[in-house]
Image (tube, coloured by chain):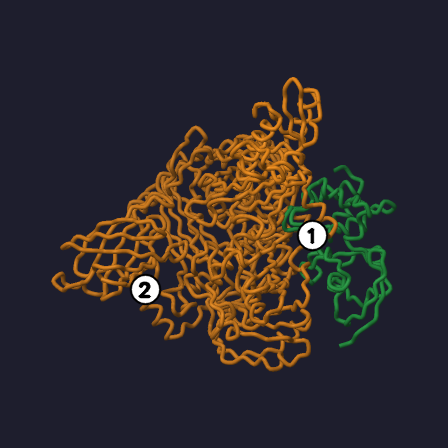
């Protein structure tokens, strides 16, 4: 150990002060140095010896049977190494999984097998020496199809043939109550004011500037290195391991720089899996980089939804009751069949609403499947905030006043919403208070009135919202994040954190947290999050979680390391641990004779001379900590924007946009504001221009960036940010997430401003996107020309007899046969064997759950136990003939009583489980032994 | 398939190659010349991520063939910073203003700004903004890009 350097106390204090204060500081990003100079490593920048390129041959039709595939011309093209179809990949057993790592509700083929279910469905893959040749060869593949009429829209899904003939119906997932609640209906009917909004939301392409891509390199005996454009290498490695039945340590997922994701790259999907399998088959490194045409037509998409929201208000404009009917297009192969319970959870998550009920369904169609997009449940804010403005106009209240009368304020908490959401620290009303200090509403109204006289249409729109961030309730893959911090023998700090950046800047923000808590200079901390083999499990970027969950893990790990450093330094310097101060990458012992040692000095001893450590202290200077954040950390905000709509052109000019957030303690305000701004730009695109469209045959009609329009620098105004309403959360560090918020609160803010501007022309028709032609149609009071042309194209599709019969006879998830019908109950005297060991599968909104159980009877009394993951749940119920009924109380993900009804037929059991707000789930069982 | 001998200067160094007629400049720069900072975002000239400088002018390298660059001087994002690592003023301004997040569109924006804001030939702010409207950034909402552009064009940030 070097001789301690002597410093006076004043210098010590100053040095320490310099090293702290990183949290909350607007620091330049670590990532930028490489990204600005072209030194980033995105997946297409990875080159390996002998690597071959992949191109896919995709279905040109939305639905049909594959009669034959002719690969001969493609295989003969010079430079082609292999042409593969589903038959070639069939030797591998792959279990495709949802984001929750659950089995999908319908089988998802890697490559199409006997039929295609959407335009762009991958049918074959060409492996060639370069991409040009691979695409040439893909164009030489000839597939003969027996084309069928596709199910394209939500409306088609309800009446058309089954998208998946083996499924019960086109309902992919359902939650809520299918039967109207008579009391609620009466409240809606009899209230002083009933306000309704009903609209469809267009489909959105996440459109990261970097498309999907993968490089797969089989190595050694049964090991894989997969370079992947993704949202988190850890979760993706876990996904591959589980899907392929391989040890996770045999699969190394590397994801250094990723050019945006926004929900698209949360998990591997069909193409990535096909490339990995082909690399294993051919024993060569393979690369596939999605092109933009593929990205706009074959990468999973989001947001195609419909909602009818009805709300009863009392005479004072206070909420009385509400009902929502919701539909979500899942496409053919969703990454997780979804009816989006979060829409219902947060629709009235911040308001004093006594009664709420809903029915939500996700539908299969012959379109590309559903994936996540920033704030997947955002429709709740759009529907609610637009409705509140309508209600204000209908009731004759100011839009701000109607919000103030109904929002839950800080002093109203803790409280619980009708959906069972326990609120402790939301603050949309307080954010609105701050917002209103920044905008002179009265002055605006005067300006607006004056402008209207001149034929200029100005509008002011408001919205408030709350957002669940770092939510983990009931979602096993999101439960925790890990941080591993090591003082290297060099004295430098390296941290492996299970966060991941696709633009989030987590190398910077996690570095700020660690540097501050350890008392080291920011530049002395290197953060790594790019390699699944480097650190412990974590999910990466999902659900606005990284500041809260990753930041919390970094704080706890750093604090534990500081504790060890203090104990060690105190022992070596012969002072009390309290006298040790860390700062400016130095360790100081305060006292009469100040002593200073470096981190390297301590590391030398910790790793090289562990015999000098205090008795019982382990060698080394490193800590790994896994942090479990609170189940949900709420972020709140209120936004306002001012627009001018040109009555001659229909163009919307956004003149001002003001944000007021409660985002807790900020790690880096520039990063926080960057997240808000990015989400708002996407919101502007969503409201004004972006639309994934299809013709009646399911052909995508926005296949380039000339047709799928993204906001440019002229479409996005400068945003004003106000953080005064922020209060620390209860999570470690007091952070709240901000990743998705702009994309959730942005759309209603803008729509409300446009509706306000055009109020002189009547209530705005909600057709998204609100393109200039649609707004002109509204202004001119005429229907859009395109709409008149549409009916011929979108005539109801003929339904094949066989499919109709199948559809009519099949039970559906939301309409299961009641246990008592159509079969007659077996008379009690008939000996029905209930007792025995059973295995069950329950089709829940999170995916199918398999478990075992025992049931036994004593007369008409039923007792039983379900066993899942070494956890037992006991129940009692009744038996009548072959009919069983029982209730099961659970506490996860929330307190709820599950009501089961089932019937036994021999060794088979079928039934359903009513899960309160989560709707009904199908239960099937099979007796294992008596 | 036609092949062509070309020679050009890339970031100050000579490059000789035999290329197919159909090879785009962007694929040539990435694959043959190793300039992986050239990012291919749409391959149809809308997003601007692949922008490089050819003889001092910003061009979309996905819309130009490699053979067309024969005899030209090409600068990519790798060629801007000083040897000692000092960032080019455009790069520094974007870093200072948080003008990037994922960084995928960034090289193209850097090249457009560099071509329009060279010390001896600074374009007016409105011309710079017009040029930037040919670049799509999905992450930042253009906030920091706009601030950086104003600084570089000589206006107030």
- Local packing at callout 2 (Cα closer than 10 Å; few below 14, some 14-19, many 20+) is some
Q: Which residue is mark 1?
A: A40
Image spot of residue A6 (x, y percent) = 71, 23
Q: Identify whether A39 is placed above or below A661.
A: below
Badge count: 2
How far apart are the alpha carbons under marks 2 and 1?
53 Å
Looking at this rendering, what residue extends furthest in the top direction? A592
Query: In the rendering, what colour is chain B?
Result: green
Image quadrant assignment for residue A527: top right
Residue assigned mark 2? A811
The numbered disc on residue A179 is none
Residue A539 appears left or right of A212 = left
- Where in the figure is residue A619, as x and y percent of width and height? 57, 39
Q: Is residue A576 visible?
A: yes
Whether labels 2 and 1 belong to a single chain: the reply is yes
Toward the viewer: A620 or B118?
A: A620
Q: Residues within 10 Å of mark 1 (few under 14, many from 20)?
A: many
Q: Position of residue A557 (x, y in %)?
A: 54, 38
Using residue A296 as the reference point, say whether residue A40 is left or right of it: right
Q: Tag 1, which secondary structure?
A: loop
**Colour chain A appears in:** orange
Q: Quadrant of the C terminus of chain A?
A: bottom left
**Residue A272 quadrant:** bottom right
């Amino acid at each position: 150990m070097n001789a301690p350097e002597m410093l006076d106390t004043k210098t010590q204090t100053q040095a320490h002060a310099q090293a702290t204060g990183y949290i909350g500081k607007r620091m330049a990003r670590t990532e930028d140095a490489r990204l600005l100079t072209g030194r980033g490593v995105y997946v297409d920048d990875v080159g390996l010896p002998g690597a071959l390129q992949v191109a896919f041959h995709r279905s040109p039709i939305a639905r049909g049977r594959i009669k034959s595939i002719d690969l001969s011309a493609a295989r003969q093209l010079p430079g082609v190494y292999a042409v593969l179809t589903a038959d070639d990949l069939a030797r591998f057993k792959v279990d495709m999984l949802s984001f929750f790592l659950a089995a999908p509700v319908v089988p998802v083929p890697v490559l199409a097998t006997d039929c295609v279910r959407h335009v762009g469905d991958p049918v074959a893959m060409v492996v060639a020496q370069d991409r040009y040749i691979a695409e040439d060869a893909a164009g030489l593949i000839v597939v003969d199809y027996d084309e069928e009429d596709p199910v394209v829209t939500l409306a088609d899904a309800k009446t058309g043939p089954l998208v998946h003939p083996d499924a019960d119906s086109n309902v992919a997932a359902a939650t809520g109550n299918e039967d109207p609640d008579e009391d609620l209906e009466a409240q809606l009917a009899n209230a002083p004011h009933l306000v309704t909004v009903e609209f469809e939301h267009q489909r959105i392409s996440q459109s990261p500037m970097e498309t999907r891509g993968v490089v797969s390199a089989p190595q050694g005996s049964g090991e894989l290195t997969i370079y992947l454009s993704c949202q988190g290498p850890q979760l993706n490695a876990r996904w591959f391991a589980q899907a392929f039945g391989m040890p996770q340590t045999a699969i190394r997922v590397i994801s250094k720089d990723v050019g945006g994701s926004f929900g698209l790259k949360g998990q591997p999907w069909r193409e990535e899996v096909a490339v990995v399998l082909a690399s294993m088959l051919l024993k060569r490194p393979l690369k596939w980089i999605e092109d933009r045409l593929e990205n706009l037509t074959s990468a999973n998409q989001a947001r195609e939804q419909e909602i009818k929201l009805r709300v009863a208000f009392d005479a004072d404009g206070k909420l009385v009751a509400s009902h929502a009917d919701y539909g979500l297009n899942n496409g053919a192969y969703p990454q997780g069949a979804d009816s989006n319970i979060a829409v219902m959870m947060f629709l009235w998550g911040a308001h004093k609403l006594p009664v709420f009920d809903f029915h939500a369904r996700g539908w299969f169609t012959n379109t590309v499947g559903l994936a996540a997009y920033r704030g997947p449940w955002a429709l709740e804010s759009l529907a609610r905030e637009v409705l509140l403005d309508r209600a204000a106009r209908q009731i004759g209240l100011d839009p701000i006043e109607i919000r103030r009368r109904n929002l839950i304020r800080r002093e109203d908490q803790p409280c619980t919403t009708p959906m069972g959401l326990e609120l402790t620290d939301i603050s949309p009303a307080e954010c609105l208070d701050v917002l209103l200090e920044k905008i002179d509403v009265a002055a605006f109204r005067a300006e607006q009135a004056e402008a209207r006289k001149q034929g200029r249409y100005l509008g002011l729109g408001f919205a408030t919202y709350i957002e669940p961030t770092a939510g983990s309730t009931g979602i096993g893959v999101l439960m925790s994040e890990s941080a591993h911090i090591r003082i290297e023998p060099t004295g430098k700090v390296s941290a492996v954190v299970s966060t991941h950046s696709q633009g989030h800047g987590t190398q910077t923000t996690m570095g700020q947290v660690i540097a501050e808590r350890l008392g080291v200079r920011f530049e002395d901390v290197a953060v790594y999050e790019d390699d699944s083999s480097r650190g412990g499990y974590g999910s990466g970027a999902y659900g606005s979680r990284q500041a809260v969950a990753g930041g919390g893990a970094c704080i706890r790990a750093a604090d534990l390391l500081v504790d060890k450093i203090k104990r060690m330094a105190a022992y070596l310097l012969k002072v009390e641990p309290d006298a040790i101060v860390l700062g400016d990458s130095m360790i100081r012992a305060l006292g009469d004779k100040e002593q200073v040692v470096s981190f390297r000095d301590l590391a030398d001893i910790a790793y090289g001379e562990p015999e000098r450590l205090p008795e019982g202290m382990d060698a080394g200077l490193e800590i790994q900590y896994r942090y479990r954040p609170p189940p949900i950390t709420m972020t709140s905000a209120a936004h306002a924007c001012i627009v001018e709509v040109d009555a001659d052109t229909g163009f919307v000019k956004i003149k001002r946009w003001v944000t007021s957030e409660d985002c807790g303690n900020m790690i880096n305000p520039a990063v926080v504001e960057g997240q808000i701004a990015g989400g708002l730009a996407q919101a502007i695109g969503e409201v004004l221009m972006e639309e994934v469209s299809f013709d009646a045959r399911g052909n995508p009609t926005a296949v380039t960036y000339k047709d799928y329009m993204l906001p440019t620098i002229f479409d996005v105004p400068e945003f004003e940010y106000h953080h005064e309403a922020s209060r620390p959360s209860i999570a470690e560090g007091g952070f709240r997430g901000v990743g998705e918020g702009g994309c959730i609160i942005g759309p209603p803010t803008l729509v409300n401003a446009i509706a306000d501007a055009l109020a002189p022309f009547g209530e705005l028709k909600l057709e998204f996107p609100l393109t200039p032609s649609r707004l002109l149609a509204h202004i001119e009071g005429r229907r859009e020309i395109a709409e008149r042309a549409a009916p011929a194209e979108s005539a109801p599709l003929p339904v094949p007899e066989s499919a109709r019969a199948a559809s009519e006879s099949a039970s559906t998830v939301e309409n299961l046969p009641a246990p008592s019908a159509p079969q007659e109950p077996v008379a009690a005297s008939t000996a029905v064997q209930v007792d025995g060991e059973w295995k069950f599968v329950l089709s829940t909104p999170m995916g199918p759950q398999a478990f075992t159980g025992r049931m036994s009877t004593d007369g008409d009394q039923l007792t039983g136990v379900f066993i899942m993951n070494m956890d037992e749940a006991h129940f009692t119920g009744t038996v009548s003939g072959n009919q069983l009924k029982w209730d099961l109380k659970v506490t996860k993900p929330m307190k709820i009583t599950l009501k089961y009804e089932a019937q036994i037929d021999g060794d088979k059991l079928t039934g359903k489980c009513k899960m309160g707000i989560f709707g009904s789930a199908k239960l099937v069982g099979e007796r294992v032994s008596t | 398939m036609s092949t062509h001998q070309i020679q050009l200067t890339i970031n100050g160094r000579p490059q000789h190659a035999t290329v197919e007629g159909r090879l785009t400049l962007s694929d040539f720069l990435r694959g043959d010349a190793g300039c992986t900072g050239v990012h291919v975002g749409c391959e149809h000239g809308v997003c601007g991520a692949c922008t490089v400088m050819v003889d001092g002018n910003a061009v979309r390298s996905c819309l130009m063939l490699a053979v067309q660059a024969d005899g030209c001087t090409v600068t990519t994002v790798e060629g801007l910073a000083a040897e000692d690592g000092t960032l080019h003023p455009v790069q520094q301004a974007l870093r200072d203003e948080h003008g990037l997040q994922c960084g995928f569109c960034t090289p193209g924006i850097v090249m457009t700004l560099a071509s329009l804001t060279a010390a001896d030939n600074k374009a007016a702010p409105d011309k710079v903004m017009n040029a930037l409207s040919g670049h799509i950034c999905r992450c930042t909402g253009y906030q920091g890009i706009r601030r950086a552009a104003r600084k570089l064009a000589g206006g107030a940030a």
